[in-house]
Amino acid sequence: DLEEARVRLSSAMSSRHIGPFVEEVDAWSLKLSAVAETLELWVEVQAMWKYVEAVYSSSDIAIQLPLAAKHFRELSKIWEELMTKALEARQIVQHCAGNDSLRSTLSHLLNQLSV
């Protein structure tokens, strides 16, 4: 559990025996914070994508709003590529921590899906 790992790292940081490990524990704390932030954003995008996908999956809407439907298909393609890369990565910490491109893409998707 991600939150449990963050709590354990916080406890380790307050230990008087942390001396030799402070840099490593601090690095892990930063990595796990980045993962948590990325996953929170990811869940927001997923919820918004599911909502918007339900709207644009209707052929009536696609006919009535062809430009908006096309825009959603483009965003959907980006979303599906992100999901495929995540599946291929298999290591969530390495995939999310320090991956500014991933966070930037997720932010972009969230902004565009919210329009």
Image (cartoon, rainbow, N blue to C red):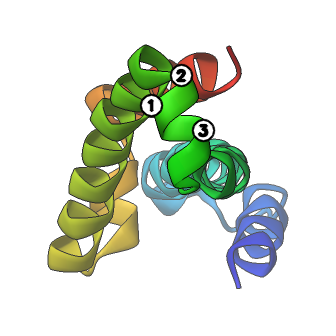
When the figure is inspected, residue 12 is found, relative to residue 42, above or below; the finding is below
Residue at position x 69%, y 68% in the image: 17
Callout 2–callout 3 Cβ contact below 8 Å: yes
Dot 3: element: helix
When the figure is inspected, residue 12 is found, relative to residue 51, above or below; the finding is below
Dot 2: element: loop
Residue at position x 74%, y 68% in the image: 12
Separation of residues labelled 1 and 2 (CA atoms): 6 Å
- Dot 1 or dot 3: first in sequence order is 3
- Please, what is the three-letter code of the amino acid marked with disc 2? Leu
- Please, what is the three-letter code of the amino acid marked with disc 1? Ala
Separation of residues labelled 1 and 3 (CA atoms): 8 Å
Callout 1–callout 2 Cβ contact below 8 Å: yes
Instruction: Assess disc 2: are there few (<14), some (14-19) or many (≥20) residues with their C-alpha within 10 Å of its C-alpha.
Output: few
Mark whose residue sits in front, 1 or 3? 3
Separation of residues labelled 2 and 3 (CA atoms): 6 Å
Residue 13 at x, y = what percent? Answer: 74, 56
Residue 107 at x, y = what percent? Answer: 53, 24
Callout 1–callout 3 Cβ contact below 8 Å: yes
Front position in the image: 8 or 103: 103
Can see residue 90? yes
Instruction: Assess disc 1: are there few (<14), some (14-19) or many (≥20) residues with their C-alpha within 10 Å of its C-alpha.
Output: many
Residue 95 lies in quadrant: bottom left
Residue 19 at x, y = what percent? Answer: 58, 55
Residue 105 at x, y = what percent? Answer: 37, 28
- Quadrant including the C terminus: top right
When the figure is inspected, residue 38 is found, relative to residue 14, above or below; the finding is above
**Residue at mark 2:** 65
